Structure formats: structure tokens, C-alpha cells
Amino acid sequence: MTNERKQRRAGAFFGRRKAKSLKPSQIVLFEQLLPKLKLGLSEPAPEDLNQLFECDADKIILEIGFGGGEHLLQRCIEQSGTGFIGCEPFINGMGTALSEVAKNQISNLRLFDEDATWLLNWLPPNSVNIIYLLYPDPWPKKRHWKRRFVNEENIRRFARVLKSGGEFRFASDIAHYGDWTLNHFDNNSDFHRSAETRNDGSQPWHGWKSTRYEKKAIREGRNSAYLTFERL
């Protein structure tokens, strides 16, 4: 591991990498399927991300921190002509997603299982149509706020890779993180709020597939905010 990666891991935006042991079938998928889908960052990214996919992708969608992949994989199935990139460093989440990819024979998806900032730095400019960041770790303690994925540096990364008119879509059930995100984007001249976000942002996007985190929030009586910021 390079010094840069050691430094990033020490202050990573994600927490633990693994919880319970993987199932034997998931271990096989990590050995056989993930290498076929994983983006290798050792070589420069193609200028046209369409080259990463078997389909003739009409657009490119990135989801950062997809958890078990409920939303991401549903979108892949429904939009077979779209190229999807999913990033998730949590090993158990990736294992769950790989099982569903194999079960549904999903072919319009590429994966990355490390730090999303490395992926964002690798992607070419003006190459992505939509970025999703759904229910990210809110790092509720003030001393940990620097580890929140929404920050000035990452917003600059979003602005670089998104096409003009592209969207950054954020969901959270933590009110403080929603306000934090609004404030950070309001202070960035590369984005403006969508009409829905300017109202109350209480409704999810068309075709929304609920995630396990959203379902937990509903069970515990918390409301979610669904915020959209358009790249100018």
C-alpha cells in the first residue's frame, strides 16, 4: 500500500470493512466475479466511459456507498441501456450485491470496492450523468464531521466528473447531515438546487427503490430528505 493510501485509510470516509463472515458462495463470487467487474485504477480511465460496458450506454450513473445494492441493482435491471458504476468498501455489502448480480445476470455494471475518492479522481471530467450518495455514514460526533463524504473537496470532485446538467442526488434521515449538505452546496458556484430540493425535498426520485437504511429510519420514526443539485 502506498503512503498516500495509508494516509487515506487512516482518515477514510467509511468505517469498518467487514462484519460477519462471508458465505462460501460469496467467497467464490469475490474470487471469480468481482475481478471481472472491478475497475482497475492502475491505467487511465477511457475518455468515453461507454467502453467499460457491454451495452451501448445512453448515460453513466455512479452510486457511492451502495450498501447491499438494493437501489443500485434495481436501477441496473430497469435501465439495461445505462452504464452503472457502484462503489462500496464494506465487504459484506459487496458480497450481497455480487450474489444479486449473479442471480439476475446483470451486465451493465462495474464495481469498485475501495475509497470512492480514488474512483472520483480516476474518472474523466464531464463523464457522469448522475451521482447518488444514499444514506451515507453521518459521523454524528462533531470530532468526526471531517469524515463526512460531503465536503468542499469532494464537491469539487463531483463537479469535475459530472456533465453539465448532471445531478448529484443525496438522501439522509439525519436532519443535521441534510442541513450540512445544503449549506455546502449553497457555497459552491458549480451547482444549484433543484426545484424539489428548494421546496422540502421530502419525496424520493422517480423509480425509487427503498434501501435497508431507509426502512430502518421509517421503523424508528425518522423522516428522510432527498436532495438534488444540478451541475451548471
Image (cartoon, rainbow, N blue to C red):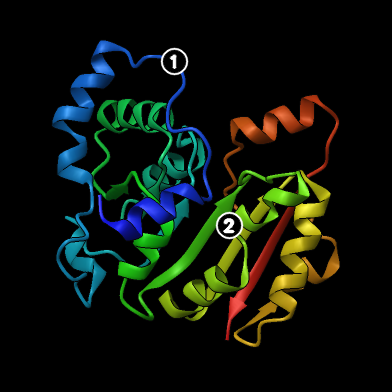
> In this orientation, does residue 205 appear?
no
- Identify whether 214 is placed above or below 95: below
Which numbered circle lies on residue 149? Answer: 2
Q: At 83% from the left edge and 36% from the top edge, which residue is drawn?
A: 222
Q: CA distance from mark 1 to mark 2?
A: 25 Å
Image quadrant in which you'd find residue 55:
bottom left
Q: Position of residue 195 (x, y in %)?
A: 76, 73
- Identify whether 149 is placed above or below 35: below
CB under 8 Å between discs 1 and 2: no
Relative to 2, 197 lies left or right: right
Q: At 43% from the left edge and 26% from the top edge, which residue is drawn?
A: 18
> In this orientation, does residue 199 appear?
yes
Q: At 57% from the left edge and 49% from the top edge, which residue is drawn?
A: 207
- Identify whether 99 is placed above or below 12: above
Q: Position of residue 49 (x, y in %)?
A: 25, 68
Name the kind of residue labelled 1 in the image. Lys
Question: SS at mark 1?
Answer: loop
Residue count near mark 2 (Cα–Cα under 10 Å), binned few <14, some 14–19, many ≥20: many
Quarter placement of the C terminus: bottom right
Q: At 31% from the left edge and 31% from the top edge, which residue is drawn?
A: 98
Which numbered circle lies on residue 20? Answer: 1
Q: Position of residue 129 (x, y in %)?
A: 44, 70
Q: Earlier in the sequence, mark 1 or mark 2?
A: 1
Name the kind of residue labelled 2 in the image. Phe
